[in-house]
Amino acid sequence: MKNMQKIFKGKIFIITLVILLICPSFTVRAEERVFHKDDDLVIVIDPGHGGTDTGTQGGRIQERFMNLITAQALAARLNMYEGVTVYMTRSDNDTTVSLTDRAKFAESVDADFIFSIHYNACVLHDRFGIETYTSRVAPYNAYGYQFGDLLMRKYSELYGIFPRGVKTRKGLRTDGDYYTIISASIYREIPAVIIEHCFADGEVDAEHTMSDDQFRSYGETDADAIAEFFGLKSSLLGIDYTGYSDLLCYADPSSFNDATYEDRSAPETVSIKVTSVDQFNNTVNIHVEGSDSDGMMLYYALSTDGGWTWENPVPWPGADALTGTYDQGFDLSLSFESGDRPNIVIKGYNRYDGYTKSNQITFIDRFNSNEIPLYREG
Ligand SMILES: [Zn+2]
């Protein structure tokens, strides 16, 4: 049900955009952005971690270093826009600043928004893509959703970094937020977003975390996204986003946005079946199906040895974390060597990395003759 609403809202947005593009003089406008700035816009950039808190150490350099490089480039470029004052919660790598102190600092400078800069990592080092976290609490949820959607579309277009969606995470003993930088900020009535730019520790995103120049480039993209979100302009850069903020995606400030729903349950079904076997070329064609009714299928991983080893996960066909849509099923063609006796299984993941394993296709015979090897679909 939630998924349906997401798709429906996405469609309204696309239809509105099309109307705007076809009829520039048409007076109907897209839903206005929900966050209206006052005259003096104050932005706090928060380079995550620092000092004794190194952040993830799974990358080329410690996360505290990556975050500062990105944050400094972000602040430098955002300062080139007019009508905005930019602060940072830390400006070196040796200072340890608590999360609450970061929010208190934002309050002391009367911040309109806080953007927390991070790089991601996971236990199995196999994830990929950009994600943002925002508050579960209205109206902050709507602000974060509109910004995250805008930001991830840029990353997908400019860098080919996979959008994992705008997410929320519930606190352990509260209906509020899990991440302190978010809960401590909204307690002070400051909207907050965590940007996890990509995974620093995995093979899939390795090409996106090779150099400091890339970290700087992401900071500049963040700055442009913030400028677009607030409708800023820069004569220095020759960029004018005036009026752009009225074109942000739909978000209702009075309620929680379904597109940021925290899906804690695994996908309901993931199944595979053989559609054909080519015994001459040692090829197996399979059909994969998956469904997650309160979320979406986002990516999948393949094993051809019954789950002892897994290939790097890849995007689920048709998966769009920003609209909540995905293909229900797709076909895969798998090639083997003569002598192989594959045992095929798929793990289908949702937007919150919950997964369900499929049934197994177990070959009883090896690929070694011109006869179709026997197999079993468990
Ligand atoms: Zn971090």
Image (cartoon, grey):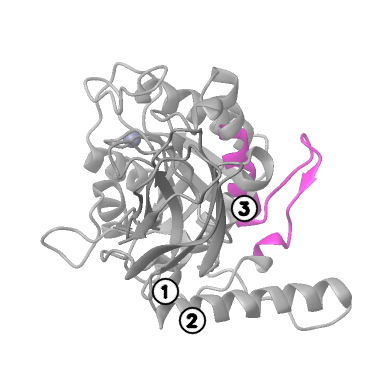
Distance, label 2 to label 1, CA atoms, is 7 Å
Q: What element carries label 3?
A: helix
- In front of the other: 166 or 182: 166
**Residue visible at 60% across and 20% down in the picture:** 213
- Residue 223: quarter of image: top right
Residue 153 marker: 3
**Badge 1 amino acid:** Asp
- Residue 38: quarter of image: bottom right
**Residue visible at 34% across and 53% down in the picture:** 353
Q: Callout 3 environment at 10 Å: few (<14), some (14 to 19), or many (20+)?
A: some
**Residue visible at 53% across and 20% down in the picture:** 210
Marks 2 & 1, CB-CB < 8 Å contact: yes
Residue named by callout 1: 258
Q: Quadrant of the N terminus?
A: bottom left
Does residue 35 show up? no
Residue 358, magenta (yes or no)? no
Q: What element carries label 1?
A: helix
**Badge 3 amino acid:** Arg
- In front of the other: 335 or 233: 335
Horizontal side of residue 164 vs 219, given as left or right: left
| Residue at far left of view | 173
Does residue 206 show up? yes
Q: What stretch is highlighted in magenta?
A: 219-245
Height in image: 32 above or below 145? Answer: below
Marks 3 & 1, CB-CB < 8 Å contact: no
Q: In which quarter of the image is the C terminus?
A: bottom left
Q: Callout 2 environment at 10 Å: few (<14), some (14 to 19), or many (20+)?
A: some
Residue named by callout 2: 5
- Residue 62: quarter of image: top left
Q: Callout 1 environment at 10 Å: few (<14), some (14 to 19), or many (20+)?
A: some
Q: Earlier in the sequence, mark 2 or mark 1?
A: 2
